């Protein structure tokens, strides 16, 4: 005996066609985000690779290698310490300007002050202090930039955007070297032009970033009223509870 066949009824009720990803980040935002990262690397890596060595040599040509290594080493240590702290504070910022914008802007401004100290430094001590300020400040901007990737870039686009971000450091080094060749050395412009590049692109990101204020501050080790010991403990991640962070066994 034949039975009537209803095509609609024969289709399994639980079959669903995947909907297109409607929450894609705009191409314009991605472009400005990548440019902001490029600008920050330009102002941060140009001194590391070229201009800081030229300034050190102008102050002490005899001991320049030792002095440069010491200054860069201390600066790297400052960056290592400051980055996670700024990131934790950025996550919990409740400013009406948003969570990331204040750190993006303040880092570039304070870093510019550090570069001014370097330009005017009469000796190695002042030069080293200026570079420490640069590292602490620019890494505040870097921490906010790092957080924008999970904040505003959906999973489907994150790999491609990460690839573009990975191209920015070497591109920034090339631009920094070109800047020094064009403006000459020693020159105040070899510090100010990279700063202008960073200020321009980070400023554009601050202007367009849909960074909403955070209305609540979650309870936890990084809240504003916690004691310093608990704040530091909040950075510990147990390798037993989170084995993926432990690395290959």
Image (spheres, rainbow, N blue to C red):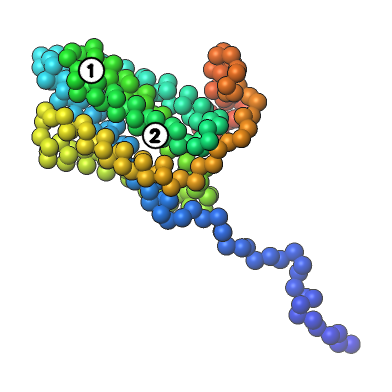
Q: Quadrant of the N terminus?
A: bottom right
Q: Residues within 10 Å of mark 1 (few under 14, many from 20)?
A: many
At x 61% / y 63%, what residue is drawn? 19
The spot of residue 140 in percent (x, y) is: 41, 29
| Residue 17 position (above or below residue 241) | below
Indicate the quadrant where residue 223 lies: top right
List the residue tagged with mark 2: 105
Q: Residues within 10 Å of mark 2 (few under 14, many from 20)?
A: many
At x 11% / y 28%, what residue is drawn? 186
At x 24% / y 14%, what residue is drawn? 126
Total marks in image? 2
* Of callouts 2 and 1, the N-terminal one: 2
| Residue 196 position (above or below residue 27) | above
What secondary structure is found at the residue carrying circle 1?
Answer: helix
The spot of residue 104 in percent (x, y) is: 41, 35
At x 45% / y 33%, what residue is drawn? 102
Residue 36 in view in this figure: no
Looking at the picture, tell me which residue is in the foreground, 226 or 7: 226
Looking at the picture, tell me which residue is in the foreground, 24 or 106: 106
| Residue 86 position (above or below residue 3) | above
What secondary structure is found at the residue carrying circle 2?
Answer: helix
List the residue tagged with mark 1: 127
Which numbered marker is on residue 89?
none
């Amino acid at each position: 005996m034949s039975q009537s066949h209803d095509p609609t009824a024969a289709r399994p009720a639980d079959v669903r066609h995947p909907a297109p990803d409607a929450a894609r980040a705009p191409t314009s935002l991605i472009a400005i985000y990548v440019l902001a990262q490029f600008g920050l690397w330009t102002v941060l890596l140009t001194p590391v690779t070229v201009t800081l060595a030229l300034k050190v040599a102008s102050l002490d040509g005899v001991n320049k290698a030792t002095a440069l290594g010491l200054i860069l080493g201390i600066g790297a240590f400052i960056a290592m310490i400051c980055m996670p702290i700024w990131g934790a504070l950025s996550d919990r910022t409740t400013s009406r300007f948003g969570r990331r914008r204040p750190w993006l802007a303040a880092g570039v401004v304070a870093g510019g002050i550090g570069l001014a100290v370097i330009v005017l430094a009469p000796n190695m001590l002042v030069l080293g202090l200026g570079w420490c300020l640069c590292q602490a400040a620019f890494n505040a901007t870097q921490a906010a930039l790092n957080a924008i990737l999970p904040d505003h870039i959906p999973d489907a686009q994150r790999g491609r955007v990460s690839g573009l971000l990975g191209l920015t450091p070497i591109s920034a080094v090339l631009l920094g070297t070109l800047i020094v060749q064009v403006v000459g050395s020693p020159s105040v412009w070899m510090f100010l032009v990279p700063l202008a590049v960073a200020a321009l692109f980070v400023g554009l990101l601050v202007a367009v970033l849909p960074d909403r204020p955070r209305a609540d501050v979650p309870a936890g080790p990084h809240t504003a009223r916690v004691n310093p010991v608990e704040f530091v403990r909040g950075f510990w991640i147990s390798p037993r509870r989170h084995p993926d962070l432990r690395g290959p066994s």
